[in-house]
Protein backbone atom coordinates (compact mmCIF):
# COMPACT_ATOMS: atom_id res chain seq x y z
CA UNK A 1 0.00 0.00 0.00
CA UNK A 2 1.41 3.43 -0.98
CA UNK A 3 2.64 5.52 1.92
CA UNK A 4 0.06 8.26 1.36
CA UNK A 5 -2.84 5.78 1.71
CA UNK A 6 -1.34 4.26 4.84
CA UNK A 7 -1.00 7.72 6.43
CA UNK A 8 -4.57 8.60 5.42
CA UNK A 9 -5.86 5.31 6.87
CA UNK A 10 -4.01 5.87 10.14
CA UNK A 11 -5.39 9.41 10.30
CA UNK A 12 -8.96 8.19 9.73
CA UNK A 13 -8.57 5.49 12.36
CA UNK A 14 -7.19 8.04 14.81
CA UNK A 15 -10.15 10.36 14.17
CA UNK A 16 -12.56 7.48 14.63
CA UNK A 17 -10.94 6.44 17.91
CA UNK A 18 -11.04 10.05 19.06
CA UNK A 19 -14.74 10.35 18.23
CA UNK A 20 -15.56 7.04 19.94
CA UNK A 21 -13.62 8.13 23.03
CA UNK A 22 -15.55 11.39 23.12
CA UNK A 23 -18.84 9.57 22.75
CA UNK A 24 -17.90 7.23 25.61
CA UNK A 25 -16.94 10.14 27.81
CA UNK A 26 -20.24 11.85 27.04
CA UNK A 27 -22.16 8.67 27.84
CA UNK A 28 -20.27 8.19 31.12
CA UNK A 29 -20.80 11.83 32.06
CA UNK A 30 -24.51 11.53 31.26
CA UNK A 31 -24.84 8.41 33.38
CA UNK A 32 -22.99 10.08 36.21
CA UNK A 33 -25.34 13.07 35.99
CA UNK A 34 -28.40 10.83 35.90
CA UNK A 35 -27.18 8.53 38.67
CA UNK A 36 -25.13 10.62 41.10
CA UNK A 37 -25.95 8.15 43.84
CA UNK A 38 -23.80 5.54 42.10
CA UNK A 39 -20.62 7.59 42.43
CA UNK A 40 -17.38 5.73 42.90
CA UNK A 41 -17.29 6.20 46.66
CA UNK A 42 -13.89 4.62 47.00
CA UNK A 43 -12.33 7.46 45.00
CA UNK A 44 -14.15 10.31 46.76
CA UNK A 45 -14.82 11.43 50.30
CA UNK A 46 -18.16 9.65 50.31
CA UNK A 47 -19.84 6.97 52.41
CA UNK A 48 -22.44 4.77 50.74
CA UNK A 49 -24.62 2.58 52.93
CA UNK A 50 -27.81 0.53 52.68
CA UNK A 51 -31.14 0.94 54.41
CA UNK A 52 -34.06 -1.46 54.17
CA UNK A 53 -36.54 1.31 53.33
CA UNK A 54 -36.84 4.90 52.15
CA UNK A 55 -36.14 7.92 54.35
CA UNK A 56 -39.85 8.84 54.09
CA UNK A 57 -41.24 12.02 55.74
CA UNK A 58 -38.41 13.79 57.58
CA UNK A 59 -40.60 16.36 59.32
CA UNK A 60 -38.78 16.53 62.69
CA UNK A 61 -42.05 16.90 64.62
CA UNK A 62 -43.62 13.68 63.32
CA UNK A 63 -42.73 9.99 63.42
CA UNK A 64 -42.86 8.67 59.87
CA UNK A 65 -39.25 9.35 58.86
CA UNK A 66 -36.05 7.45 59.48
CA UNK A 67 -34.59 8.66 62.77
CA UNK A 68 -30.97 8.41 61.63
CA UNK A 69 -31.79 10.80 58.77
CA UNK A 70 -33.63 13.24 61.03
CA UNK A 71 -30.63 13.26 63.34
CA UNK A 72 -28.38 14.28 60.43
CA UNK A 73 -30.56 17.29 59.63
CA UNK A 74 -31.92 18.58 62.93
CA UNK A 75 -30.57 19.49 66.36
CA UNK A 76 -32.05 20.20 69.78
CA UNK A 77 -31.19 22.46 72.70
CA UNK A 78 -29.23 19.73 74.49
CA UNK A 79 -27.81 16.36 73.50
CA UNK A 80 -27.31 13.02 75.18
CA UNK A 81 -23.75 11.73 75.34
CA UNK A 82 -21.96 8.95 77.16
CA UNK A 83 -21.17 11.54 79.81
CA UNK A 84 -24.79 12.64 80.25
CA UNK A 85 -26.66 15.73 79.03
CA UNK A 86 -24.44 18.30 77.33
CA UNK A 87 -25.00 21.68 75.57
CA UNK A 88 -25.99 21.76 71.90
CA UNK A 89 -28.00 24.67 70.47
CA UNK A 90 -28.25 25.93 74.04
CA UNK A 91 -24.82 26.72 75.44
CA UNK A 92 -26.12 26.61 79.03
CA UNK A 93 -29.33 26.32 81.06
CA UNK A 94 -30.64 26.99 84.54
CA UNK A 95 -33.31 25.11 86.51
CA UNK A 96 -35.46 26.73 89.19
CA UNK A 97 -35.30 25.39 92.73
CA UNK A 98 -38.73 23.78 92.42
CA UNK A 99 -37.69 22.00 89.19
CA UNK A 100 -40.50 23.57 87.16
CA UNK A 101 -38.74 26.29 85.14
CA UNK A 102 -35.89 25.75 82.64
CA UNK A 103 -34.12 28.78 81.20
CA UNK A 104 -31.93 28.12 78.15
CA UNK A 105 -29.20 30.47 76.92
CA UNK A 106 -28.93 29.84 73.18
CA UNK A 107 -25.91 30.02 70.92
CA UNK A 108 -25.81 33.22 68.86
CA UNK A 109 -23.85 31.79 65.88
CA UNK A 110 -26.33 29.25 64.53
CA UNK A 111 -28.11 29.36 61.17
CA UNK A 112 -30.49 26.97 59.47
CA UNK A 113 -29.25 25.43 56.23
CA UNK A 114 -31.31 28.02 54.28
CA UNK A 115 -29.41 30.86 55.97
CA UNK A 116 -32.17 31.78 58.45
CA UNK A 117 -30.95 32.70 61.94
CA UNK A 118 -31.72 30.32 64.78
CA UNK A 119 -32.79 32.21 67.90
CA UNK A 120 -35.31 32.08 70.72
CA UNK A 121 -38.13 33.20 68.40
CA UNK A 122 -37.43 30.32 65.98
CA UNK A 123 -37.11 27.90 68.90
CA UNK A 124 -40.45 28.97 70.38
CA UNK A 125 -42.16 28.69 66.99
CA UNK A 126 -40.93 25.08 66.74
CA UNK A 127 -41.95 24.10 70.24
CA UNK A 128 -45.34 25.74 69.77
CA UNK A 129 -45.74 23.67 66.58
CA UNK A 130 -45.17 20.51 68.63
CA UNK A 131 -47.62 21.60 71.32
CA UNK A 132 -50.29 22.39 68.70
CA UNK A 133 -50.20 18.71 67.80
CA UNK A 134 -49.83 17.49 71.39
CA UNK A 135 -52.27 14.60 71.02
CA UNK A 136 -49.76 13.02 68.63
CA UNK A 137 -47.05 13.27 71.28
CA UNK A 138 -48.92 11.83 74.25
CA UNK A 139 -46.20 9.26 74.81
CA UNK A 140 -43.96 12.14 75.95
CA UNK A 141 -44.89 13.01 79.51
CA UNK A 142 -43.04 16.29 79.02
CA UNK A 143 -45.60 17.49 76.44
CA UNK A 144 -48.41 17.00 78.94
CA UNK A 145 -46.50 18.97 81.57
CA UNK A 146 -45.38 22.01 79.54
CA UNK A 147 -47.32 25.04 80.76
CA UNK A 148 -45.64 27.94 78.93
CA UNK A 149 -42.90 28.65 76.40
CA UNK A 150 -41.58 32.23 76.56
CA UNK A 151 -38.99 34.28 74.70
CA UNK A 152 -37.03 36.22 77.34
CA UNK A 153 -34.81 37.88 74.72
CA UNK A 154 -33.42 37.01 71.29
CA UNK A 155 -31.20 34.26 72.67
CA UNK A 156 -32.92 33.25 75.91
CA UNK A 157 -35.82 30.80 76.03
CA UNK A 158 -37.84 29.83 79.12
CA UNK A 159 -39.96 26.69 79.44
CA UNK A 160 -42.29 26.33 82.44
CA UNK A 161 -43.76 23.01 83.59
CA UNK A 162 -46.89 22.34 85.62
CA UNK A 163 -44.98 19.83 87.72
CA UNK A 164 -41.31 18.90 88.08
CA UNK A 165 -40.23 16.17 85.69
CA UNK A 166 -36.81 14.56 86.08
CA UNK A 167 -36.44 13.20 82.47
CA UNK A 168 -37.22 16.64 80.96
CA UNK A 169 -33.76 17.21 79.47
CA UNK A 170 -33.58 13.62 78.21
CA UNK A 171 -36.84 14.03 76.30
CA UNK A 172 -35.66 17.40 74.98
CA UNK A 173 -32.58 15.66 73.57
CA UNK A 174 -34.07 12.61 71.85
CA UNK A 175 -34.31 12.53 68.06
CA UNK A 176 -37.92 13.69 67.85
CA UNK A 177 -40.06 15.71 68.24
CA UNK A 178 -38.16 18.51 70.06
CA UNK A 179 -35.87 19.44 67.17
CA UNK A 180 -35.79 22.60 65.11
CA UNK A 181 -36.73 23.31 61.49
CA UNK A 182 -36.46 26.64 59.68
CA UNK A 183 -39.56 28.84 60.09
CA UNK A 184 -39.50 29.31 56.30
CA UNK A 185 -40.06 25.56 55.88
CA UNK A 186 -43.22 25.54 57.99
CA UNK A 187 -46.76 25.58 56.61
CA UNK A 188 -49.03 28.22 58.13
CA UNK A 189 -46.49 28.77 60.90
CA UNK A 190 -46.52 25.13 61.99
CA UNK A 191 -45.64 21.56 61.04
CA UNK A 192 -48.85 19.65 61.80
CA UNK A 193 -49.89 19.87 58.14
CA UNK A 194 -46.40 18.99 56.92
CA UNK A 195 -43.37 21.03 55.89
CA UNK A 196 -42.17 22.65 52.64
CA UNK A 197 -38.60 21.40 52.95
CA UNK A 198 -36.33 19.59 55.39
CA UNK A 199 -34.25 22.54 56.61
CA UNK A 200 -32.44 22.15 59.94
CA UNK A 201 -29.30 23.34 61.71
CA UNK A 202 -27.52 19.97 61.57
CA UNK A 203 -24.23 19.15 59.83
CA UNK A 204 -25.92 17.68 56.73
CA UNK A 205 -28.63 18.63 54.25
CA UNK A 206 -30.77 16.35 52.10
CA UNK A 207 -29.56 17.41 48.65
CA UNK A 208 -31.19 14.72 46.51
CA UNK A 209 -33.84 12.07 46.98
CA UNK A 210 -35.58 9.50 44.83
CA UNK A 211 -38.38 7.66 46.61
CA UNK A 212 -37.60 4.02 47.39
CA UNK A 213 -34.27 4.29 45.56
CA UNK A 214 -31.72 6.57 47.22
CA UNK A 215 -31.05 9.70 49.23
CA UNK A 216 -27.97 11.95 49.11
CA UNK A 217 -26.83 14.02 52.08
CA UNK A 218 -24.19 16.74 51.68
CA UNK A 219 -22.62 19.24 54.05
CA UNK A 220 -24.62 22.15 55.46
CA UNK A 221 -22.73 25.28 54.26
CA UNK A 222 -23.95 27.24 57.28
CA UNK A 223 -23.10 24.63 59.89
CA UNK A 224 -21.95 26.27 63.12
CA UNK A 225 -20.14 23.26 64.64
CA UNK A 226 -17.18 21.10 63.73
CA UNK A 227 -17.30 20.11 60.09
CA UNK A 228 -17.79 16.35 59.49
CA UNK A 229 -14.84 14.46 58.06
CA UNK A 230 -16.97 13.12 55.22
CA UNK A 231 -18.36 15.25 52.36
CA UNK A 232 -21.30 13.16 51.29
CA UNK A 233 -23.45 10.29 52.59
CA UNK A 234 -25.44 8.21 50.10
CA UNK A 235 -28.20 5.91 51.27
CA UNK A 236 -29.36 3.15 48.92
CA UNK A 237 -32.69 1.47 49.56
CA UNK A 238 -32.06 -2.29 49.57
CA UNK A 239 -34.95 -4.12 51.27
CA UNK A 240 -33.63 -7.66 50.79
CA UNK A 241 -31.06 -8.92 53.30
CA UNK A 242 -29.10 -11.06 50.85
CA UNK A 243 -29.02 -8.28 48.27
CA UNK A 244 -27.53 -5.94 50.89
CA UNK A 245 -24.79 -8.43 51.65
CA UNK A 246 -24.05 -8.88 47.95
CA UNK A 247 -23.83 -5.09 47.49
CA UNK A 248 -21.31 -4.90 50.34
CA UNK A 249 -19.27 -7.76 48.91
CA UNK A 250 -19.19 -6.14 45.45
CA UNK A 251 -18.14 -2.75 46.82
CA UNK A 252 -21.40 -1.02 45.88
CA UNK A 253 -21.85 0.06 49.49
CA UNK A 254 -19.35 0.67 52.28
CA UNK A 255 -21.47 0.04 55.35
CA UNK A 256 -24.34 -1.97 56.81
CA UNK A 257 -25.46 -0.58 60.18
CA UNK A 258 -28.26 -1.43 62.61
CA UNK A 259 -29.53 -4.19 64.83
CA UNK A 260 -31.81 -5.76 62.19
CA UNK A 261 -29.83 -4.93 59.05
CA UNK A 262 -27.65 -8.04 59.12
CA UNK A 263 -28.51 -11.39 60.65
CA UNK A 264 -26.36 -13.16 63.21
CA UNK A 265 -25.04 -15.82 60.81
CA UNK A 266 -23.89 -13.32 58.21
CA UNK A 267 -22.38 -11.12 60.91
CA UNK A 268 -20.35 -14.07 62.19
CA UNK A 269 -19.11 -14.84 58.67
CA UNK A 270 -18.00 -11.26 58.04
CA UNK A 271 -16.16 -11.25 61.36
CA UNK A 272 -13.78 -13.80 59.81
CA UNK A 273 -13.40 -11.86 56.53
CA UNK A 274 -10.26 -9.69 56.55
CA UNK A 275 -11.70 -7.36 53.90
CA UNK A 276 -14.27 -6.10 56.38
CA UNK A 277 -14.55 -4.85 59.94
CA UNK A 278 -17.37 -5.86 62.28
CA UNK A 279 -18.40 -4.30 65.56
CA UNK A 280 -21.25 -4.39 68.07
CA UNK A 281 -22.58 -1.80 70.48
CA UNK A 282 -23.29 -2.25 74.15
CA UNK A 283 -26.80 -3.65 74.92
CA UNK A 284 -29.34 -1.05 73.82
CA UNK A 285 -32.78 -2.60 74.34
CA UNK A 286 -34.60 -5.74 75.43
CA UNK A 287 -36.01 -8.20 72.91
CA UNK A 288 -39.10 -9.69 74.54
CA UNK A 289 -42.43 -11.45 74.15
CA UNK A 290 -45.60 -9.67 75.29
CA UNK A 291 -48.52 -11.73 76.60
CA UNK A 292 -52.05 -10.34 76.37
CA UNK A 293 -53.59 -10.69 79.83
CA UNK A 294 -57.10 -10.04 78.45
CA UNK A 295 -56.95 -13.28 76.47
CA UNK A 296 -59.13 -16.03 78.03
CA UNK A 297 -56.16 -18.38 78.29
CA UNK A 298 -53.44 -15.88 79.16
CA UNK A 299 -55.54 -14.17 81.81
CA UNK A 300 -54.32 -16.93 84.15
CA UNK A 301 -50.94 -16.05 85.67
CA UNK A 302 -50.14 -19.79 86.01
CA UNK A 303 -50.30 -20.16 82.21
CA UNK A 304 -48.19 -17.04 81.72
CA UNK A 305 -45.56 -18.39 84.10
CA UNK A 306 -45.62 -21.77 82.33
CA UNK A 307 -44.80 -19.98 79.08
CA UNK A 308 -41.90 -18.27 80.85
CA UNK A 309 -40.43 -21.55 82.09
CA UNK A 310 -40.99 -23.21 78.69
CA UNK A 311 -38.47 -21.11 76.71
CA UNK A 312 -34.76 -21.89 76.60
CA UNK A 313 -33.34 -18.38 76.16
CA UNK A 314 -29.78 -19.69 75.86
CA UNK A 315 -30.80 -21.60 72.73
CA UNK A 316 -32.16 -18.37 71.27
CA UNK A 317 -29.09 -16.30 72.23
CA UNK A 318 -26.49 -18.85 71.18
CA UNK A 319 -28.22 -21.09 68.63
CA UNK A 320 -30.39 -18.61 66.74
CA UNK A 321 -28.53 -15.33 67.33
CA UNK A 322 -25.03 -16.80 67.25
CA UNK A 323 -24.06 -15.31 70.61
CA UNK A 324 -24.51 -11.77 69.31
CA UNK A 325 -27.01 -11.01 72.08
CA UNK A 326 -26.97 -11.89 75.76
CA UNK A 327 -29.75 -13.70 77.61
CA UNK A 328 -32.19 -11.29 79.25
CA UNK A 329 -33.27 -12.35 82.73
CA UNK A 330 -35.24 -9.21 83.51
CA UNK A 331 -37.49 -6.82 81.60
CA UNK A 332 -34.78 -4.15 81.58
CA UNK A 333 -31.06 -4.76 81.91
CA UNK A 334 -29.59 -4.02 85.30
CA UNK A 335 -27.45 -1.23 83.88
CA UNK A 336 -30.62 0.72 82.95
CA UNK A 337 -31.38 3.40 85.58
CA UNK A 338 -33.70 2.21 88.38
CA UNK A 339 -33.66 -1.37 87.02
CA UNK A 340 -31.08 -3.05 89.24
CA UNK A 341 -33.65 -5.07 91.20
CA UNK A 342 -33.16 -8.27 93.16
CA UNK A 343 -35.71 -10.57 91.50
CA UNK A 344 -35.50 -14.25 90.59
CA UNK A 345 -35.44 -14.91 86.83
CA UNK A 346 -37.65 -17.54 85.20
CA UNK A 347 -35.11 -20.20 84.23
CA UNK A 348 -35.73 -22.83 81.59
CA UNK A 349 -37.67 -25.55 83.41
CA UNK A 350 -40.11 -27.63 81.28
CA UNK A 351 -41.11 -29.79 84.25
CA UNK A 352 -42.11 -26.69 86.21
CA UNK A 353 -44.03 -25.42 83.17
CA UNK A 354 -46.00 -28.69 82.93
CA UNK A 355 -46.79 -28.60 86.67
CA UNK A 356 -48.19 -25.08 86.34
CA UNK A 357 -50.33 -26.02 83.34
CA UNK A 358 -51.71 -29.02 85.22
CA UNK A 359 -52.39 -26.80 88.23
CA UNK A 360 -54.24 -24.35 85.98
CA UNK A 361 -56.52 -27.18 84.79
CA UNK A 362 -55.00 -27.79 81.37
CA UNK A 363 -54.87 -31.59 80.95
CA UNK A 364 -53.20 -33.68 78.26
CA UNK A 365 -55.56 -36.50 77.34
CA UNK A 366 -54.22 -39.82 76.13
CA UNK A 367 -53.52 -39.81 72.41
CA UNK A 368 -53.71 -36.02 72.17
CA UNK A 369 -50.82 -33.63 71.60
CA UNK A 370 -52.67 -30.51 72.77
CA UNK A 371 -53.89 -29.81 76.31
CA UNK A 372 -57.60 -29.24 76.90
CA UNK A 373 -59.58 -27.45 79.61
CA UNK A 374 -63.37 -27.69 79.74
CA UNK A 375 -63.39 -28.83 76.12
CA UNK A 376 -61.23 -25.96 74.89
CA UNK A 377 -57.79 -26.68 73.38
CA UNK A 378 -54.71 -24.76 74.52
CA UNK A 379 -54.09 -22.93 71.24
CA UNK A 380 -52.39 -19.53 70.99
CA UNK A 381 -51.17 -17.38 68.10
CA UNK A 382 -47.92 -15.45 68.00
CA UNK A 383 -47.73 -12.47 65.64
CA UNK A 384 -44.43 -11.31 64.20
CA UNK A 385 -43.03 -8.75 61.78
CA UNK A 386 -42.36 -10.59 58.52
CA UNK A 387 -39.62 -8.04 57.68
CA UNK A 388 -37.56 -9.20 60.66
CA UNK A 389 -36.11 -12.63 59.89
CA UNK A 390 -35.04 -13.35 63.47
CA UNK A 391 -38.61 -13.01 64.75
CA UNK A 392 -39.87 -15.77 62.47
CA UNK A 393 -36.98 -18.05 63.47
CA UNK A 394 -37.56 -17.44 67.17
CA UNK A 395 -41.31 -17.97 66.74
CA UNK A 396 -40.68 -21.32 65.01
CA UNK A 397 -38.38 -22.35 67.86
CA UNK A 398 -41.02 -21.37 70.45
CA UNK A 399 -43.60 -23.35 68.50
CA UNK A 400 -41.52 -26.53 68.80
CA UNK A 401 -40.71 -25.93 72.50
CA UNK A 402 -44.32 -25.29 73.46
CA UNK A 403 -45.50 -28.33 71.49
CA UNK A 404 -43.49 -30.45 73.97
CA UNK A 405 -45.62 -28.93 76.76
CA UNK A 406 -48.92 -29.63 74.99
CA UNK A 407 -49.37 -26.05 73.74
CA UNK A 408 -50.24 -25.45 70.09
CA UNK A 409 -48.64 -22.18 68.97
CA UNK A 410 -49.75 -20.84 65.62
CA UNK A 411 -47.52 -18.42 63.69
CA UNK A 412 -48.78 -15.34 61.87
CA UNK A 413 -46.37 -13.00 60.09
CA UNK A 414 -47.40 -9.71 58.50
CA UNK A 415 -45.93 -6.49 57.13
CA UNK A 416 -44.56 -3.99 59.64
CA UNK A 417 -47.40 -1.45 59.55
CA UNK A 418 -50.13 -4.07 59.90
CA UNK A 419 -48.10 -5.68 62.67
CA UNK A 420 -47.79 -2.37 64.57
CA UNK A 421 -51.47 -1.55 64.06
CA UNK A 422 -52.35 -4.93 65.55
CA UNK A 423 -50.19 -4.18 68.59
CA UNK A 424 -51.82 -0.80 69.21
CA UNK A 425 -55.29 -2.31 68.87
CA UNK A 426 -54.43 -5.14 71.28
CA UNK A 427 -55.60 -7.75 68.77
CA UNK A 428 -53.12 -10.47 69.64
CA UNK A 429 -52.46 -13.37 72.00
CA UNK A 430 -48.66 -13.22 71.95
CA UNK A 431 -46.54 -10.70 70.12
CA UNK A 432 -42.89 -9.68 69.84
CA UNK A 433 -41.99 -6.47 71.62
CA UNK A 434 -38.90 -4.44 72.48
CA UNK A 435 -38.16 -1.91 75.15
CA UNK A 436 -37.67 1.59 73.80
CA UNK A 437 -33.93 1.30 74.38
CA UNK A 438 -31.32 3.89 75.23
CA UNK A 439 -31.97 6.63 76.25
CA UNK A 440 -35.76 6.06 76.48
CA UNK A 441 -35.55 3.35 79.15
CA UNK A 442 -36.97 3.29 81.70
CA UNK A 443 -38.99 6.54 81.69
CA UNK A 444 -40.47 6.60 78.17
CA UNK A 445 -40.91 2.83 77.90
CA UNK A 446 -42.87 2.73 81.16
CA UNK A 447 -44.75 5.95 80.41
CA UNK A 448 -45.92 4.39 77.14
CA UNK A 449 -47.60 1.64 79.14
CA UNK A 450 -50.21 4.14 80.38
CA UNK A 451 -51.59 4.82 76.90
CA UNK A 452 -52.39 2.68 73.82
CA UNK A 453 -49.12 3.73 72.16
CA UNK A 454 -48.03 0.15 71.39
CA UNK A 455 -49.33 -3.14 72.72
CA UNK A 456 -48.31 -2.73 76.37
CA UNK A 457 -51.33 -0.76 77.62
CA UNK A 458 -54.01 -3.10 76.29
CA UNK A 459 -52.01 -6.24 77.09
CA UNK A 460 -51.89 -5.21 80.76
CA UNK A 461 -55.65 -4.58 81.10
CA UNK A 462 -56.22 -8.03 82.59
CA UNK A 463 -53.97 -7.26 85.58
CA UNK A 464 -55.75 -6.48 88.86
CA UNK A 465 -52.98 -3.99 89.69
CA UNK A 466 -53.10 -2.10 86.38
CA UNK A 467 -54.44 1.11 87.93
CA UNK A 468 -51.76 1.12 90.62
CA UNK A 469 -49.06 0.39 88.02
CA UNK A 470 -50.10 3.44 85.99
CA UNK A 471 -50.30 5.66 89.06
CA UNK A 472 -46.85 4.53 90.18
CA UNK A 473 -45.36 5.35 86.79
CA UNK A 474 -46.92 8.82 86.83
CA UNK A 475 -45.73 9.54 90.36
CA UNK A 476 -42.21 8.30 89.60
CA UNK A 477 -41.91 10.64 86.63
CA UNK A 478 -42.88 13.77 88.58
CA UNK A 479 -41.18 12.94 91.88
CA UNK A 480 -38.24 15.13 92.93
CA UNK A 481 -37.26 12.61 95.60
CA UNK A 482 -34.71 10.09 94.33
CA UNK A 483 -35.56 7.46 96.97
CA UNK A 484 -39.28 7.70 96.23
CA UNK A 485 -38.67 7.53 92.49
CA UNK A 486 -36.51 4.42 92.91
CA UNK A 487 -39.16 2.73 95.07
CA UNK A 488 -41.94 3.43 92.55
CA UNK A 489 -39.95 2.15 89.56
CA UNK A 490 -39.00 -0.95 91.53
CA UNK A 491 -42.66 -1.62 92.33
CA UNK A 492 -43.67 -1.39 88.65
CA UNK A 493 -40.85 -3.61 87.35
CA UNK A 494 -41.26 -6.16 90.15
CA UNK A 495 -45.04 -6.38 89.65
CA UNK A 496 -44.73 -6.87 85.89
CA UNK A 497 -42.13 -9.58 86.53
CA UNK A 498 -44.25 -11.41 89.10
CA UNK A 499 -47.31 -11.21 86.86
CA UNK A 500 -45.22 -12.68 84.00
CA UNK A 501 -46.63 -10.25 81.44
CA UNK A 502 -43.34 -10.05 79.54
CA UNK A 503 -40.93 -12.80 78.56
CA UNK A 504 -37.54 -11.08 78.21
CA UNK A 505 -35.45 -13.01 75.68
CA UNK A 506 -32.20 -11.19 74.94
CA UNK A 507 -30.59 -7.77 75.17
CA UNK A 508 -30.24 -6.37 71.66
CA UNK A 509 -27.17 -4.64 70.22
CA UNK A 510 -26.51 -2.49 67.18
CA UNK A 511 -24.22 -4.11 64.60
CA UNK A 512 -22.00 -2.69 61.89
CA UNK A 513 -20.16 -4.34 59.02
CA UNK A 514 -18.01 -2.09 56.86
CA UNK A 515 -15.02 -2.00 54.54
CA UNK A 516 -11.47 -1.52 55.78
CA UNK A 517 -11.48 1.88 54.04
CA UNK A 518 -13.78 3.35 56.70
CA UNK A 519 -12.83 4.66 60.13
CA UNK A 520 -14.67 6.34 62.98
CA UNK A 521 -17.63 3.94 62.91
CA UNK A 522 -19.08 4.32 66.39
CA UNK A 523 -22.38 4.03 68.23
CA UNK A 524 -24.55 6.79 69.65
CA UNK A 525 -26.24 6.73 73.03
CA UNK A 526 -29.49 7.00 71.07
CA UNK A 527 -29.85 3.58 69.47
CA UNK A 528 -31.50 4.83 66.27
CA UNK A 529 -28.80 7.36 65.36
CA UNK A 530 -25.91 6.66 62.99
CA UNK A 531 -23.08 9.11 63.79
CA UNK A 532 -21.90 9.78 60.23
CA UNK A 533 -20.28 13.02 61.40
CA UNK A 534 -17.58 10.92 63.12
CA UNK A 535 -16.81 8.67 60.15
CA UNK A 536 -14.02 9.15 57.62
CA UNK A 537 -12.30 7.42 54.74
CA UNK A 538 -8.82 6.21 55.61
Image (cartoon, grey):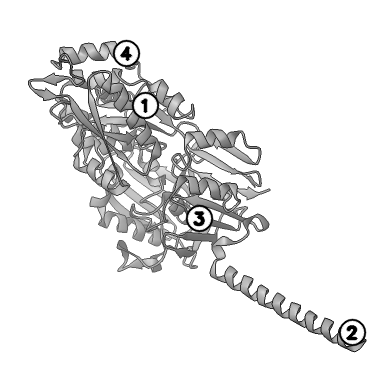
Task: Tell me which corner region of the image, top left, top right, bottom left or bottom right, holds residue 367.
Answer: top left
Seen at 15% across and 17% down, the residue is: 362
Crowd band around label 3 with a 10 angstrom C-alpha radius: few (<14), some (14–19), many (20+):
many
Disc nearer the start of the sequence (1/3): 3
The alpha-carbon separation of the residues under discs 1 and 3 comes to 32 Å
Residue occupied by mark 2: 1
Residue occupied by mark 3: 235
Horizontally, residue 87 falls left or right of residue 502, namely right
Residue occupied by mark 4: 349
Secondary structure beneath label 1: strand
Disc ID at residue 505: 1
* Residue 25 in the image, given as x and y percentages of width and height: 67, 73
- How many callouts does the rendering have? 4
Crowd band around label 4 with a 10 angstrom C-alpha radius: few (<14), some (14–19), many (20+):
some
Disc nearer the start of the sequence (4/1): 4
* Residue 314 in the image, given as x and y percentages of width and height: 41, 21
Disc nearer the start of the sequence (2/1): 2
Amino acid sequence: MPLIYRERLITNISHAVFKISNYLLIIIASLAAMLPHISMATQENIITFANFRDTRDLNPHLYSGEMWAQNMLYESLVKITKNGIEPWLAKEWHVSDDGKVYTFILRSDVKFSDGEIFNAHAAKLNLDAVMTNKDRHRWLEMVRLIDAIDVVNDFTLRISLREPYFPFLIEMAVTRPMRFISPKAMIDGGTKKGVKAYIGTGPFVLSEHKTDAYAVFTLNPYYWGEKPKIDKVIMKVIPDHQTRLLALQKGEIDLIYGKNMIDADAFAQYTKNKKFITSMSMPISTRMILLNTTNDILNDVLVRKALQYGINKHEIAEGILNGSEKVADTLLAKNVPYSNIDITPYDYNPKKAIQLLEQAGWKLEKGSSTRIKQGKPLVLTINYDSNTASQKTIAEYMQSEYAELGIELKLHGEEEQAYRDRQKAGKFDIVFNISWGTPYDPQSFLSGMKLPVYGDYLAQQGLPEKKKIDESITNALISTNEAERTQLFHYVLTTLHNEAVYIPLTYERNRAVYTNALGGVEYSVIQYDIPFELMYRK
